[in-house]
Amino acid sequence: MDKKKKPGIKRSSQVQLLKGKLDISRSGMGFVIVENQDKDILVRPNDFGKAFHGDIVRVQVATGVSSTKRSEGKVVEVVERKQTMFVGNVKITKNIAFFEISGDKPIPDFYIPIEKLNGAVDGDKVIARFVKWDKDDRKPQAEVQSVIKSSDESDMAMKEILIEAGFPIGFEEQLIKEAEEFSGKITREETSKRKDCRDILTFTIDPVDAKDFDDAISIRNLDNGNYEIGVHIADVSHFVKPGTLMDKVAYERATSVYLPDRVNPMLPEKISNELCSLRPNEDKYTFSVIFQITNRGEIKHTWIGRTIIHSNHRFSYEEVQQIIETKDGLQFKAILLLNNLAQQFRAKRFENGAINFSSTEVKFQLDENAKPIGIVIKESKEAHKLIEEFMLLANKAVAEYVSKIKINKEPIPFPYRIHATPDDEKIKPFAAFARKFGYQFDMHDEKQVASSFNNLLRDVHGKPEQHVLEQLGIRTMAKAVYTPENIGHYGLGFENYCHFTSPIRRYPDVMVHRILQECLDKNLKVDKKMGERCKHCSDKERSAMEAERAGNKYKQVEYMKQFLGDEFEGIISGVAAFGFWVETVDHKCEGLVSVKDLNTYDDFQHDEADYALVGMRTKKKFRMGDKIRIKVVAANLTKRQLDYEWVVEGGGGESLGGGGVKKLKSKKSK
């Protein structure tokens, strides 16, 4: 008997298989997001197959002409799991164990064999690992990795954030064993293959609490009056070889994740903190870019290759900043020279079209239980910029070298770090908004846009609108990604750029090291999956950034709980139809002021062009960048959400705007 056709869809005998990411909404409906396709594919709950939220899947779609707005499909294959670790609760009845997953995304319960409970009992909160979901299995199968102690809510939340983002916690015993078998012994055979830089003054400059040091700088005077400056990077590829379990795990993670109270590393501690960490007074294998530079910042010669170094000292950023400011201290002549050269490189970058976005880092002061007891706002100072400029220089030099190498007149597959030019459709509304503050934008070409950005960033410094224009400016920019298609890096003003300087915490840097050595050896192996690998690394980088934001948000909520009912000065940091976000001046903690509360005073509508909510009656305007006073009314750790309430100036008794407008008072005023 013929099945009834769904209304609005003309079926075809042909079907199409498409690959994309399955996104399951809270309501239970699924959507497969296919790259370079405008419309997502609707997948109903019964058609998910063996897929979970976030998985990369193949979906079968009818190719018939459809009169509906969205194609419908059915998942037929799971290509790649977003995550294999989950947080949830164990339920045991009559010697049968199930695992109920926490979170707001619909997902079936997992079956757990009794012998795989790992000590968990009924009701325990656990971390479980997905094992399999075979064709004939009714439910997916899992095993308990560890039981989470309910007493440490914060620890559990951080682990949950990592797991939801698709990052495993800890390393399997087999991998730890593989790492322990590596030797840190410096051999005569290996040293003979490398440039020996151990007798040159070398040091590292890192955050005071850093545990892995993956870059060092060396400096010495040359007889011709120039300086030889080496950028030395931990030689992770010496230990992590293609095809090994270590390499497989590093690639899957693709990046370390930095949460407020911990690091979830890409590589086991034996490698990241010991074998590859450029610790002082130890000989280490490195991959280096060594420059011959004049005192005017002109690069006369560049050498790239494997080296062996001996770090003489470990500096913190604070120590180097003090040396720069006082012009005194350990190795002050070398540091002042490096700083002078870095400033010259920086100035040249901006002359060539780089954009000077400043950055501030918000760090939590934590007690012994990782509870936030204070917030420190760290600005990027000369010491940070010194390191940044030399790392940029090395990354650029490596990319330039590789870009010139061809196979059959074709560029070799290589993970460039690219940053596309701004989209006109994003720049135009931003430029119009900036004009309201008196800042002009030249839109004639890309270089003029960059120049306009720099003029704005310079002129806005220290003014009330600085924060809003900087934040909106950053949002207009494209996201930097890894790709073999080299289109340059717009934000840095570089035609060629890659990531070479952080292989301990970024997998693309490991790929760069391997390809670089193949180029030097003239023994190139063309990686036909480079595009796929680059996309994977870009996706994992985004996941890590989302996890880091979630971790910071959790700590913000945890910190602000102590201030419930208190009032603070804030700046409107974002606007939407349902309300606006406010970032407190003192703590940089962001919360939402709901339009539902604002409608107590007036009917507020969203003005997208002006980044504002506007009262229809009073014309009261809440615009991004405005200063405002708020009260902390709720701090929800489960949702990682802060709720603020607008404090009406003068206690709520004065006019909200416009001559002759009736005075209004909040119903919530006490």
Image (cartoon, helix red, strand yellow):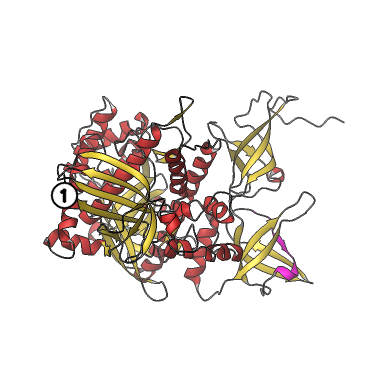
Quadrant of residue 615 in the image?
top left
Q: Residues within 10 Å of mark 1 (few under 14, many from 20)?
A: some
Towards the viewer: 312 or 412: 312
Residue 642 x %, y % = 40, 60
Residue 290 x %, y % = 29, 46
Q: Is residue 348 above or below residue 629?
A: above
- Residue at x 59% of width, y 30% of height: 69
Q: Is residue 568 above or below residue 433?
A: below
Say which element carries label 1. helix
Quadrant of residue 590 in the image?
bottom left
Q: Which residues are magenta?
A: 106-116
Q: Name the residue carrying label 1.
A: 340
Left of 130 or right of it: where is 624?
left
- Residue at x 33% of width, y 62% of height: 363
Towards the viewer: 13 or 253: 253
- Residue at x 42% of width, y 62% of height: 186
Q: Is residue 299 above or below residue 212?
A: above
Residue 453 x %, y % = 24, 37
Q: Is residue 615 visible in the rendered structure shown here?
A: no
- What amino acid type is highlighted by mark number 1? Asn
Q: Is residue 479 magenta?
A: no
Left of 424 or right of it: where is 222?
left
